Image: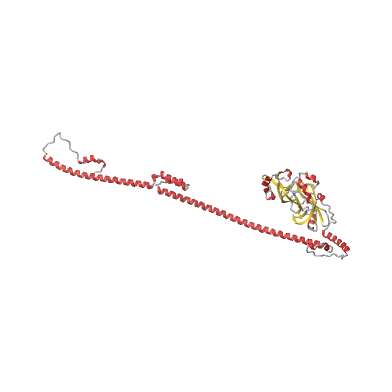
Amino acid sequence: MKKQKNKFTTIFSNINIRPVVSEEKDKYLSLASAQELKKFIPNIDTQANIDLLPIAFDACVVNRINKNGDVIDHETAANVSKYFVNKPINVEHNRNHVVGCILTSSFSKFGSNEPLTEEEAKNTKGPFNVTLGGVVWKIVSQDLADKLEESNDPTSENYMSISASWELGFDEYNIVMLEDGEKNIENGQFVTDQKEIDNIESNLRSFGGNGKFKDKHVYRQVLGKVIPLGVGLTLNPAADVKGVAVENKESTLGEDLKAASEENSISQDEKLNVKKDTIYMKISKIEEITDALLKEVTASSITDFIAEEIKKVNDQFVNEKAEKENQIKVASEKLASVTAEHDTVKKQIEELNQKLASIEAEQLAKAKQEAFNIRMASFDEEYDLSDEDRKVLAEDIKDLNEEAFAGYKNKMAVLMKEKNKSAKKAKASEEVQASNVTQEVKASVTEEVKTSEEVAQISTTQEVVEQAVDNGSKASAEIPNSAPAAEPTIREKYAKAFDLDGFEIKK
């Protein structure tokens, strides 16, 4: 049970009083008969009280959800309905526009308006009516009284067109959960645990919710210290009970009050020995109405004053209403303008975000391409690459970040050292130097061989000459058969010593 002291009020609206079949097609719904309601009209001597219009109406349906999402159960209704007596009747729940008061409180069956006792009401779990009786003060609002009487005329277009609703103050409530289309709380599930109520209450229509929780409709059950605050006559229906009944009297307030005033004036004149002529006096403020003044003025003076005051209040109400409507219109226009501007700004921001994202993507792609180009250029600069090498490297490094690329580059330094341009250049230089040394050695050896040959030739020539001289002197001598073989020539000696097959001998 939710309890908050003197915090809540609710309105149990009831009626668009027209004798038609409800579109809701509820099996419990039945139009209240004005004739049956007349049983509950207070017993007022309207001949003696010509300024009073007795009325009766069903104020609400107990045990049945109203369109405001609230409900009162049979026990609470039986206990508090009697406190409606002497409470005000106003117009459209405007407490500054009181037009009468409540005099009686009763119960009746839903749909037939057959009377129920208080004990029967306490034990009825199905829907039934709280039926109230009261009076409307014609002197305050003759126009309203006329419309109420017209609403009881079956031949009028306004037949049963007046609505009624009661107001309650309360400090506790439970939550009732019902299936879709169900209105009677006897078929509902009651939530009384405080934690569960706190969890659900934001879904109540009275707290701005949509009236649903999970797969069920949720409503507020009025409990605790319930105080009836009065009844409002309205054109806006909200519940299933229909009907405001009045007595069928054919009299006008102006004529009756004038006649009564003239009669009283004559009687007073006789008693007080004053002029029998009635006096019309313009009354400007309520403080001017005194017992002495009432003895001298006609009823029309009073009615004119009241009419003027009502007109002032009405004009003020109309002006305030127009001003509020204008403020609402201006606020709505501003809201529409701000909403349009917000939508425009939102669209512009979205476009800017899209452009920014596109620019960032382009810059990222450009930076990535530049990094790729630099990396490939560095490999080309460092290594002697083939097209196949470049293709493999490009596929490997295209998505690497800086750290991964550094590791990859170190790995390639090992795997591709044979293609390193610097290393290859150094090796080539060493080979050239080695080749040059070899050529120099060969040239040196060749020169030595050439020199040796020339010396050998000279020595041979001398030896030949010498031998020829010797042979000349010994020409006649015979060579013995046992003479040793001839000595090797100089060429043969060098060939044997230097292995002339590896040298080029210039002749």
Q: Is residue 441 visible?
A: yes
Q: Which scheme is used to colour this image of the protein?
A: secondary structure
Query: Hey, which quadrant is residue 89 in on the image?
Result: bottom right
**Residue furthest top in the image:** 482
Which residue does the image show at 73% across and 59% down from the upper left? Answer: 318
Q: In which quadrant of the rendered image does the C terminus lie?
A: top left
Which residue does the image show at 19% across and 44% down from the upper left? Answer: 457
Q: Position of residue 423 (x, y in %)?
A: 37, 46
Q: Position of residue 307 (x, y in %)?
A: 78, 61
Q: Position of residue 115 (x, y in %)?
A: 81, 47
Position of 486 with respect to 186 (left or right) is left
Q: Is residue 19 visible?
A: no
Please determine whether, in this image, residue 491 is positioned above or below residue 17: above
Total marks in image:
0
Depth check, front residue: 15 or 21 = 15
Position of 450 with respect to 52 (left or right) is left
Query: Hey, which quadrant is residue 488 in on the image?
Result: top left
Position of 78 with respect to 483 (left or right) is right
Q: Position of residue 136 (x, y in %)?
A: 80, 55
